[in-house]
Image: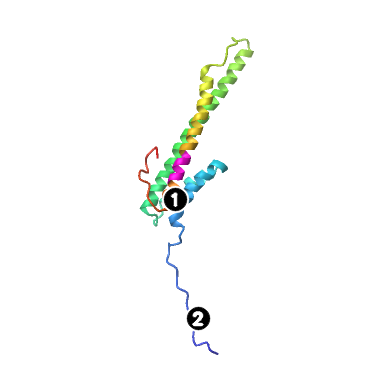
Amino acid sequence: MGNTGAPPTPQPQPAGNTGVTMQRPFIIALLYLLNLVLGISAIVGVILAYVWRNEPETQEWEKTHYTYLIRTFWISFAVGVAFVMLWFGAVFGSILQAEMTQQGGPNEPPPAMLFVGMFGGMLLLLLNVIWFSIRSVLSLAKAGSAKPMPKPKTWWF
């Protein structure tokens, strides 16, 4: 009875302002750090970085983070492949040495390169994890305050 008109129409929210856009580099850096525990989330992170980098609403400061994080992934991946090759080469070298000894070859101690390969590979892996973590934390910190990465194409920090 007291209703004199139609209910008020809700005002539409501005398009593209979801609040998530500013946090996208933060999310990717967080996925990178979670990779240390989960082992696969960095792949999701790098895919998101490639997708989000090319969206029209991506801001310039975000693009610097995407470049930085994509490079972080690929450099770390290349070092990881080098680690696997070095470590497995050392392991298979030691197996070959043992096989040769069993087949009547000279009974020699394992070559020094075996130890260099195994321990050098482990050191390479540890340094790679530290480097990857530092770069992820730096991007996380800068993205939290919406600041661009100063040198997104650098190999260091």
Read off the residue under disc 1. Answer: 25
Q: Quadrant of residue 11?
A: bottom left
- Label 1: few (<14), some (14–19) or many (≥20) C-alpha neighbours in 10 Å: many
Is 106 inside the magenta-drawn segment? no
**Above or below, comparing residue 88 to residue 20 in the picture:** above
Q: Are marks 1 and 2 in contact (CB under 8 Å)?
A: no
Residue 115, horizontal then vertical, whole percent: 53, 21
Q: Amino acid at mark 2?
A: Pro
Residue 120, horizontal then vertical, whole percent: 50, 26
Residue 124, horizontal then vertical, whole percent: 49, 30
Left or right of 92, for residue 148: left
Q: Quadrant of residue 37?
A: top right
Residue 149, horizontal then vertical, whole percent: 38, 46
Quadrant where the C terminus is found in the figure: top left
Looking at the image, is mark 1 or mark 2 nearer the viewer? Answer: 1
- Does the image show residue 39? no
Q: Is 138 or 90 nearer to us in this picture?
A: 138
Callout count: 2
Residue ID at (46%, 44%): 136
The circle on residue 134 is none
Quadrant where the N terminus is found in the figure: bottom right
Q: Amino acid at mark 1?
A: Pro
Give the residues in magenta.
Answer: 132-138
Read off the residue under disc 2. Answer: 7
